[in-house]
Image: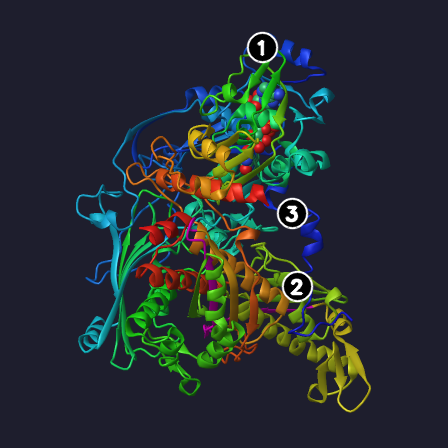
């Protein structure tokens, strides 16, 4: 049986290749004769570059070229774009942070690219880089997102006052203030959204080939969107338009980070075009830490207003969001999602966010799994727990009193989003049952008998997925014996090929074995972007529409072949059939006779989806050491519908583990004075490992999404949204019981927890 | 990595001769510290002399009162050795707690103690189990061998041949791992030798050290409560991102109790 219906667990077709080490990642492309590049980076967080002497490096053995910011300027390359316009509340536009692909006169973070060495071997390039003499004049640096906005802080950009690159209000301040004015109770929190490093297994890489016959370049690079890179590199930075083709093979993890153009990508293409030679670069782990766009980095002051019955009135926050030294492509937009997510799954009258985006002498920040949603949900769900404790209402009860009810859909939230579906109360009830919430006191007593402290934490979450830009698209090509699917998205390890084959198999009634999926070629694939949990929603829908179009386009040919009127022909199970007869022609026969059938779906409805769910966590803390173990972990999600339950759970598990990493372990720590990254390797930056993670009890509570024909909501980021508040709520459950502590910042390391308990 | 010459030694004598020939040559054991430092360009030996082919450096010998391990014996071999598990289970367990599978399959006891990383595990075993380190020149007691951060009593050209551990009545090692590197933030080895006891601490200070007060208390009575109230001063202990000195000091006492309890079970 090779026709798999939507909703079945199909094992990942990618796995045999990838698990046997037969995948083909960018660095696996090693043609003879390609030159190797090494990027010399600033060791200073902030310094003027008064001159660069490359004489010795250029004469070193095997060196082909040494390029600097002066060459970038001479060649008139464009700067790295930030494509998000922002208007400040005073009507002025946000600040600009024009970034050349190689720093010209100023380095603004440790790792900022300063020179590119191209040589016959990697080692020759790296040896030569040590001969480059850069005349730096170190300047005072600032790393702290909040400190940067205080008077007297060193300026990252002299033209950006107080390092505030954007200052805006989202939602109605007046409405929120009015609600707060009549509140019976106000709960407050001050918190930190810890800065994170994406750390995909496969580092960033770029390999550019040049074809003198056509004057075209092909960039092979690990990415989430060949189309976006083609546009940004080809049109904006190198200004060569379609003379650039971008390809991505297997991608070993991305998590948002590889959606962004990084300077090395245009840099390598540029070098290759100058030298008319293939040039390759693969970043190492240290470069990943020092240059991959990072995530989160907020300082938050927030408040929740309630009436005397514990009804939520309004939520408001002032968020300082770190942008790093330069505005990355989507950076200023990401923290804006804090506002849209602040109402979570509750009926609020008002939600207001004062967002202050600051630049610091650190690696740029951009989308990282969740991209603004975890940050927003965390604020509200932490506030709710604090309010519950202050008002002596059980946390599940306080949430229950405030849920948006199924009868209210479509429901416009206080942040202006229109939720289409969900059953928040039913979902929470299911989670409480799954978690045996009622049995917690007994488990707590058992822990205490063993000298351990046990806490329980609950969170609800909702996400905004799908959406308008950029449109995702699918092209389908059918010939006499095969179907080719060309998605705009790029698989980063999710299993897109499997799900696309499953979908198209069902849409067309064709065996999966006769379906091919080909991704990641800007010449062949239509526009698209992997990100924002959009694949199932947007690409899945596009595939369905393209499939229908294929069937429709074949109808005329089928009518001819079957000698029947199109109106009398129906399509099913891969065949065009004359209704009420046994006369039929296969799709392949029809396509063969028609010389192939092609369809391209590129429109996007722009419809949003709202995956939601509940995480319940039980922690056990060793009071002597502060070690926190996750003892029980229950997740109930509403993803609308499961296309492939196994792959869906893979997303839930992966996202949750990343959330656990943020809550307990991960933190990109910069030195306050020097702005050096102190956690620049896996010796100091703690990623979650198998023994940090419990077994998850996962269940679904699907309510079909009404905004797309598949009824799916998207699941890629859900876990990373739910885990942090649930875990911190559970830890604070202990800290409050023992010490009256209201909050602990992430990551709640063993030492922090120990100090909280013993302070 | 910078360029270097590579030589495979067939015997200890050949390795010694190789070291003599080239001032900046270094011995290569499992490469788990050295190769990593070279890749980061933090270490630049002119030549590597690989000890990997010298069979006499790979052995485990259990005799009355001692367990002797050849310098090139890997952590994985020690961890899995039936003889070690029987004679000195704490040592097998300690070896099994080092790094990850790949590190244990490559890394060696000789390399580990020659390197003397302040957070390494074997130094605690050596000091806590009164080990004697045999080199191509002499025998050195563990108490004299470890000299603070990354420093040992080894002379230039001196090659570790083996390490002999005294078998105690009972012993245990408890390691509080750095969540990132999984090296020891604090590791405590306690050993009960009947009339005496040893307590060795790694990870907490600039180098492995003993705690005389705990040893005295444990010699009198080998029980967790004997050390429960012995506080270790924070002065001189490491303070870093992962643990401030006072936290480390506190952990030493907690882990010492747990190690004693583990040794007794
Ligand atoms: C990811 C990772 C995690 C790790 N985790 C831990 C951990 O948890 N605990 C821990 O204790 N260690 C840990 N290590 C270090 C590991 O144990 C190494 O094996 C050890 O530090 C060095 O041993 P080696 O055999 O690899 O020596 P090498 O790296 O080959 O050599 C280290 C040094 O010792 C010298 N040397 C080697 N053999 C001899 C000899 N016979 N005589 C004289 N000098 C010699 C070399 O010249 C070199 O200077 C980890 C390493 C890695 C990469």
**Residue at coordinates 60% horizontally, 31% vertically from top-left?**
B168
Mark 2 Cα shell of 10 Å, populated few (<14), some (14-19), many (≥20): some
Q: Are marks 2 and 3 on the same chain?
A: yes
Q: Position of residue A248 (x, y in %)?
A: 58, 51
Q: Does the magenta stretch include residue A615?
A: yes
Q: What element carries label 2?
A: helix
Q: Label 3 belongs to which residue?
A: A24
Q: What element carries label 1?
A: loop
Q: Do the residues labelled 3 and 1 touch (CB within 8 Å)?
A: no
Q: Label 1 belongs to which residue?
A: B22
Asked whether the viewer can see residue A664, the reply is: yes
* Number of numbered labels in the structure image: 3
Q: Label 2 belongs to which residue?
A: A498
Q: Nearer the viewer, residue A263 or B32?
A: B32
Q: Where is residue B23 in the image (x, y as percent from the top left)?
A: 55, 10
Q: Position of residue A76 (x, y in %)?
A: 38, 40
Ligand 1 quarter of the rendering: top right
**Residue at coordinates 57% horizontally, 52% vertically from top-left?**
A690
Q: Earlier in the sequence, mark 2 or mark 3?
A: 3
- Nearer to us of marks 2 and 1 is 1
Question: What's the magenta region?
Answer: A597-626
Asked whether the viewer can see residue B27, the reply is: no
Side (left or right) of B78 relative to A56: right
**Residue at coordinates 19% horizontally, 62% vertically from top-left?**
A90
Q: Nearer the viewer, residue A322 or A569?
A: A322
Q: Which quadrant is the N terminus of chain A positioned in?
A: bottom right
């Amino acid at each position: 049986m090779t026709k798999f219906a939507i909703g079945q667990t199909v094992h990942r077709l990618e796995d045999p290749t990838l698990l046997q080490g037969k995948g083909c990642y960018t660095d696996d492309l090693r043609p003879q004769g390609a030159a190797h590049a090494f990027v010399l980076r600033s060791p200073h967080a902030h310094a003027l570059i008064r001159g660069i002497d490359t004489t010795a490096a250029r004469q070193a053995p095997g060196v082909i070229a040494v390029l600097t910011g002066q060459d970038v300027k001479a060649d008139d390359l464009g700067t790295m774009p930030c494509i998000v316009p922002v208007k400040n509340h005073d009507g002025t536009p946000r600040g600009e942070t024009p970034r050349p692909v190689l720093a010209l006169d100023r380095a603004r973070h440790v790792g900022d690219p300063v020179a590119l060495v191209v040589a016959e071997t990697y080692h020759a390039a790296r040896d030569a880089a040590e001969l480059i003499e850069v005349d730096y004049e170190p300047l005072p640096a600032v790393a702290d997102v909040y400190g940067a906005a205080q008077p007297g802080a060193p300026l990252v950009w002299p033209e950006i006052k107080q390092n505030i690159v954007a200052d805006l209000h989202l939602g109605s301040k007046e409405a929120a203030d009015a609600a707060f004015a009549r509140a019976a109770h106000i709960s407050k929190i001050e918190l930190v959204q810890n800065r994170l490093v994406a750390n995909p297994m496969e580092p960033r890489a770029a390999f550019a080939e040049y074809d003198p016959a056509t004057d075209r370049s092909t960039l092979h690079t690990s990415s989430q969107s060949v189309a976006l890179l083609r546009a940004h590199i080809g049109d904006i930075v190198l200004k060569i338009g379609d003379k650039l083709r971008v390809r991505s093979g297997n991608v070993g993890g991305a998590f948002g980070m590889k959606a962004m153009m990084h300077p090395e990508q245009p840099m390598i293409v540029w070098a290759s075009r100058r030298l008319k030679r293939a040039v390759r670069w693969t970043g190492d782990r240290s470069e990943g830490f020092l240059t991959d766009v990072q995530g989160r980095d907020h300082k938050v002051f927030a408040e929740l207003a309630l009436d005397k019955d514990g009804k939520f009135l309004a939520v408001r926050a002032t968020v300082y969001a770190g942008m790093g030294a330069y505005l990355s492509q989507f950076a200023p937009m990401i923290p804006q999602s804090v506002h849209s997510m602040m109402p979570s799954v509750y009926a609020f009258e008002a939600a207001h966010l004062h967002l202050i985006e600051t630049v610091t002498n650190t690696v740029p920040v951009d989308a990282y799994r969740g991209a603004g949603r975890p940050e927003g949900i965390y604020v509200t769900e932490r506030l709710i727990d604090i309010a519950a404790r202050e008002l002596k209402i059980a946390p599940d009860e306080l949430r229950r009193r405030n849920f948006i009810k199924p009868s209210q859909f479509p429901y416009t939230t206080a942040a202006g989003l229109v939720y289409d579906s969900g059953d928040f109360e039913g979902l929470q009830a299911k989670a409480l049952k799954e978690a045996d919430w009622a049995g917690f006191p007994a488990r707590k007593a058992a822990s205490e008998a063993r000298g351990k402290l046990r806490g329980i934490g609950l969170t609800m979450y909702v996400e905004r997925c799908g959406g308008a830009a950029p449109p995702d698209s699918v092209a389908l090509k059918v010939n006499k014996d095969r179907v080719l699917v060309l998605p705009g998205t790029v698989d980063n390890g999710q299993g897109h090929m499997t799900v696309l084959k499953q979908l198209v198999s069902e849409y067309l009634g064709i065996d999966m074995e006769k379906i091919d999926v080909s991704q990641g070629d800007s010449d062949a694939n239509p526009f698209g972007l992997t990100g924002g949990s959009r694949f199932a929603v947007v690409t899945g829908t596009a595939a369905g529409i393209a499939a229908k179009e294929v069937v429709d386009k074949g109808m005329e040919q089928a009518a001819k072949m079957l000698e029947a009127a199109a109106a009398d022909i129906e399509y099913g199970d891969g065949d065009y059939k004359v209704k009420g007869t046994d006369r039929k022609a296969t799709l392949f026969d029809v396509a063969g006779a028609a010389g192939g059938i092609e369809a391209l779906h590129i429109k996007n409805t722009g419809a949003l989806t709202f995956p939601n769910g509940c995480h319940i966590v039980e922690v056990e803390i060793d009071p002597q050491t502060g070690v926190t173990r996750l003892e029980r972990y229950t997740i109930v999600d509403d993803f609308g519908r499961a296309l492939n339950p196994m792959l869906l759970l893979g997303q839930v598990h992966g996202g949750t583990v990343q959330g656990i990493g943020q809550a307990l372990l991960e933190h990109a720590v910069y030195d306050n004075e020097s702005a050096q990254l102190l956690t620049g390797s896996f010796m100091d930056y703690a990623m979650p490992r198998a023994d940090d993670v419990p077994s998850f009890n996962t269940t679904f509570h699907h309510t079909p999404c009404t905004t797309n024909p598949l009824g799916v909501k998207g699941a890629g980021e859900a876990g990373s949204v739910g885990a942090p508040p649930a875990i911190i709520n559970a830890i604070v459950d202990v800290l409050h019981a023992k010490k009256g502590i209201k909050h602990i910042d992430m990551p709640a390391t063993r030492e922090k927890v120990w100090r909280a308990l013993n302070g | 990595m910078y360029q270097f010459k590579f030589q495979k030694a067939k015997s200890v004598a050949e390795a010694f001769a190789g070291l003599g020939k080239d001032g900046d040559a270094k011995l290569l054991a499992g490469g788990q510290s050295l190769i990593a430092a070279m890749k980061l360009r933090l270490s630049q030996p002119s030549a590597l002399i690989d000890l990997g082919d010298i069979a006499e450096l790979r052995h485990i010998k259990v005799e009355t009162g001692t367990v002797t391990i050849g310098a090139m014996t890997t952590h994985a071999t020690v961890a899995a050795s039936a003889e070690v598990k029987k004679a000195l289970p704490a040592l097998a367990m300690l070896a099994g707690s080092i790094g990850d599978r790949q590190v244990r399959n490559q890394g060696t006891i000789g390399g580990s103690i020659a390197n003397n990383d302040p957070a390494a595990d074997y130094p605690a075993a050596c000091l806590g189990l009164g080990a004697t380190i045999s080199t191509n020149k002499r025998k050195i007691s563990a108490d004299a061998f470890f000299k603070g951060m990354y420093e040992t009593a080894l002379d230039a050209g001196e090659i570790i041949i083996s390490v002999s551990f005294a078998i105690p009545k009972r012993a245990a090692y408890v390691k509080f791992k750095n969540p990132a590197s999984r090296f020891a933030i604090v590791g405590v080895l306690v050993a009960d030798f009947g009339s005496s006891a040893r307590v060795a601490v790694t990870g907490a200070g600039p180098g492995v050290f003993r705690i005389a007060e705990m040893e005295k208390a444990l010699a009198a009575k080998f029980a967790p409560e004997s050390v429960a109230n012995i506080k270790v001063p924070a002065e001189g202990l490491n303070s870093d991102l992962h643990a401030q000195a006072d936290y480390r000091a506190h952990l030493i006492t907690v882990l010492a109790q747990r190690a004693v309890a583990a040794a007794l079970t």
